[in-house]
Image (cartoon, rainbow, N blue to C red):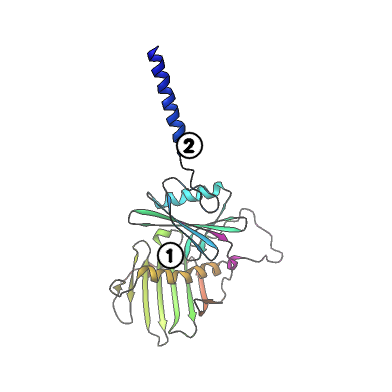
């Protein structure tokens, strides 16, 4: 009889513990766009910029697997993948739902994996007007931009011309950028930036390459400034291929020209040699 009572008490205690554990379990974290945040990631930062919600998640593991898990979580909520692209200064995987865009971007820093999810209205510059007599094509695949080059002409500014070369746009962690800036006296300053190395190199006219550190250049500040022009060019390239596009960015009057999609570059362009 005692054994039976003790056994019953034990079952009650265990059952109570399991019920309380279930009740006290925190609800699954929900991200912008209504998706369930993959396990192992937590919110580190959340901001609102130009009608876009930007959430930065931190976790660990493999960057590509993390990107895939966030992509899968969004698609479970009926977001549709439409390729790669850019929103604000971020470049990554684009998804669309109800005339809204979501972008997944990521990076690895100090053994942590950071995933950015940006959700907001469809950018106006990506609105493509329907062409007359144009029939939609079934199973049409979105254009994937892997590399790009373009020239930026700047009015009334000491730097008059900037040549951009970038590759690995479909591999965010390996993104590389080469810039040749030419001033009003035709003097050339070149820069190479590597997102994986989180550093860059500069070469002034008739001098050798030096690191950003030795040139007193802040990599992140420099990267964030120039990546804006890259994002604009990526948006324009899908719509205005072969055209010159005037724009006003950061109070600068500029013209985007010579935009080429997916050119093949020699490795030397991105090496400080």
**Image position of 101 (left or right of 208):** right
Q: Is residue 120 magenta?
A: yes
Q: Which residue is found at the position 55% from the left and 46% from the top?
A: 76
The nearer-to-camera label among 2 and 1 is: 2
Q: Residue furthest top?
A: 1
| Mark 2 surroundings within 10 Å by alpha-carbon count, few (fewer than 14), some (14 through 19), many (20 or more) | few
In the rendered structure, find residue 23 and report the number of the disc placed on it: 2
Residue situated in front as seen by the camera: 11 or 77 = 11
- Look at the picture and state if 105 lies above or below 8: below
| Mark 1 surroundings within 10 Å by alpha-carbon count, few (fewer than 14), some (14 through 19), many (20 or more) | many
Horizontal and vertical percent for residue 51? 55, 64
**SS at badge 2:** helix
Q: What span is colored magenta in the figure?
A: 116-139
Q: Which residue is found at the position 38% from the left and 13% from the top?
A: 2
Horizontal and vertical percent for residue 266? 39, 68
In the rendered structure, find residue 167 and report the number of the disc placed on it: 1
In the rendered structure, find residue 156 and report the number of the disc placed on it: none
Earlier-in-chain disc, 2 versus 1: 2
Q: Which residue is found at the position 29% from the left and 80% from the top?
A: 207
The C terminus appears in which quarter of the rendering? bottom left
Horizontal and vertical percent for residue 242? 56, 73
């Amino acid at each position: 009889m005692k054994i039976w009572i003790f056994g019953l008490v034990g079952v009650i205690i265990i059952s109570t513990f399991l019920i309380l554990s279930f009740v006290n379990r925190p609800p699954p974290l929900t991200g912008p766009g209504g998706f369930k945040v993959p396990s192992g990631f937590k919110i580190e930062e959340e901001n609102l910029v130009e009608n876009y919600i930007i959430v930065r998640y931190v976790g660990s593991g493999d960057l590509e697997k993390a990107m895939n898990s966030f992509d899968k979580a969004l698609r479970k909520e009926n977001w549709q993948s439409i390729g790669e692209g850019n929103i604000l200064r971020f470049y990554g995987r684009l998804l669309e739902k109800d005339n809204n865009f979501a972008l997944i971007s990521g990076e690895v820093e100090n053994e942590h994996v950071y995933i950015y999810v940006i959700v907001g209205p469809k950018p106006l510059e990506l609105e493509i007007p329907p062409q007359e007599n144009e029939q939609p094509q079934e199973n049409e695949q979105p254009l994937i931009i892997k590399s790009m080059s373009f020239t930026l002409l700047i009015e009334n500014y000491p730097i008059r011309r900037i040549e951009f070369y970038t590759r690995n746009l479909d591999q965010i962690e390996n993104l590389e950028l080469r810039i040749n800036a030419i001033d009003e006296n035709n003097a050339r300053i070149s820069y190479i930036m590597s997102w994986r190395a989180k550093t860059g190199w500069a070469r002034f006219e008739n001098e050798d390459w030096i690191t950003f550190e030795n040139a007193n250049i802040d990599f992140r500040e420099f990267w964030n400034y120039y990546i804006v022009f890259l994002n604009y060019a990526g948006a324009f390239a899908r719509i205005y291929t072969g055209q010159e596009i005037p724009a006003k960015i950061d109070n600068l009057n500029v013209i985007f020209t010579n935009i080429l999609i997916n050119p093949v570059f020699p490795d030397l362009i991105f090496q400080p040699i």
